[in-house]
Image (cartoon, rainbow, N blue to C red):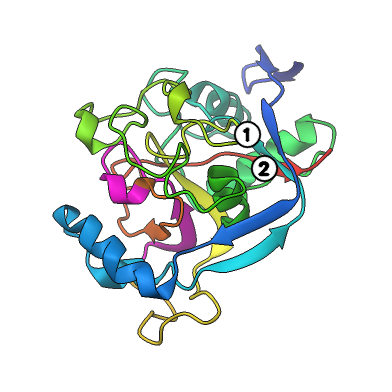
């Protein structure tokens, strides 16, 4: 832990991040083109059109170097220290819940601030590919915990909670690397600007100019359905009220 001073001079303690080491390896990214229609049909009850799933295509195998990712999302308590140091607001939520309503610029500012406190560590948002590797592991699983959706492994709309819960509340929903809450609770910013994958179907839009922010978010939040819990699902912040749609973030850093 490291002490900082708030604007009123009170000593605050910054805890070290609980990093998960993700080894270098293969990411089976996205969804095969010939499976997109099947995926859309499987989740037809959610009302999500097939066009939204085409953004996941094609399936591509890429090799990623090792990196670190935080086991849980940044909490309100952790954000409070940053807010005190920079004059930002603190959400009215329990300290152990994920912070939501955070813009992409504010999330990246938090990363820079924390990195300085941690001795110059390159703290950042994960790339979209890093996020998917941390969620999927070495195989092409559909959800962080496996091939099938199971109610009770993530804080999504089917639980009926309607708001965030304590981070790490669903340990059985962990990814193969032990990363928690990769589905549900809070949607997560990545550092990646939206663009179609190379080789994407021609009808996939080149830009999403209807999005509030051009960066890709991943994982879904408490208000979202199970389709957004899928490891391949890529979307964005399509509403201006980032608290209402549950947008938060988690940290990444280079491997040790």
User: 10 Å neighbourhood of mark 1: few (<14), some, or many (≥20)?
Assistant: many
Could you tell me which residue is drawn at 55 percent across and 33 percent down?
87
Could you tell me which residue is drawn at 40 percent across and 29 percent down?
91
State the extent of the magenta-drawn residues as a range.
211-228
Question: Quarter of the image holding residue 254?
Answer: top right
Q: Are marks 2 and 1 in contact (CB under 8 Å)?
A: yes
Q: Is residue 162 above or below residue 138?
A: above
Could you tell me which residue is drawn at 63 percent across and 29 percent down?
85
Gap between marks 2 and 1, in whole Å? 6 Å
Q: Is residue 112 left or right of residue 232?
A: right
Please identify the quadrant where the N terminus is shown.
Answer: top right
Precedes in sequence: disc 2 or disc 1: 1
User: How many numbered badges does the structure rendering display?
Assistant: 2
Q: Residue furthest bottom?
A: 202
| Residue pointed to by mark 1 | 70
Indicate the position of residue 37 as horizontal and vertical percent values.
Answer: 28, 70
Indicate the position of residue 161 as horizontal and vertical percent values.
Answer: 23, 26
Question: Quarter of the image holding residue 20?
Answer: top right
Q: Is residue 98 above or below residue 9?
A: below
Question: Quarter of the image holding residue 164?
Answer: top left
Indicate the position of residue 251 as horizontal and vertical percent values.
Answer: 62, 39
């Amino acid at each position: 832990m490291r002490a900082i001073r708030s604007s009123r001079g009170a000593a605050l303690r910054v805890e070290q991040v609980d990093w998960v080491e993700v080894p270098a390896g293969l990411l089976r990214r996205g969804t095969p083109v010939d499976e997109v229609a099947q995926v859309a049909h499987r989740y037809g009850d959610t009302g999500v059109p097939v066009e939204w799933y085409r953004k996941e295509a094609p399936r591509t195998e890429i090799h990623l170097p090792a990196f670190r990712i935080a086991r849980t999302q940044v909490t309100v308590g952790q954000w409070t220290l940053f807010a005190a140091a920079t004059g930002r607001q603190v959400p009215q939520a329990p300290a152990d819940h994920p912070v939501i309503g955070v813009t992409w610029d504010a999330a990246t500012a938090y990363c820079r601030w924390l990195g300085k406190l941690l001795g110059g560590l390159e703290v950042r948002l994960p790339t979209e590919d890093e996020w998917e590797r941390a969620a999927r592991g070495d195989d092409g699983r559909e959800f962080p915990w496996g091939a099938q959706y199971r109610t009770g492994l993530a804080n999504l709309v089917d639980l009926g909670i309607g708001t965030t819960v304590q981070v790490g509340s669903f340990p059985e929903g962990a990814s193969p690397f032990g990363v928690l809450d990769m589905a549900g609770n809070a949607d997560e910013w990545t550092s990646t600007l939206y663009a179609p994958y190379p080789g994407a179907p021609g009808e996939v839009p080149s830009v999403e100019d209807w999005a509030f922010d051009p960066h890709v978010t991943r994982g879904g939040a408490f208000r979202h359905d199970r389709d957004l819990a899928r490891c391949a699902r890529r979307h964005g912040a399509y509403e201006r009220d980032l608290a209402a749609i549950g947008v938060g973030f988690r940290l990444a850093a280079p491997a040790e």
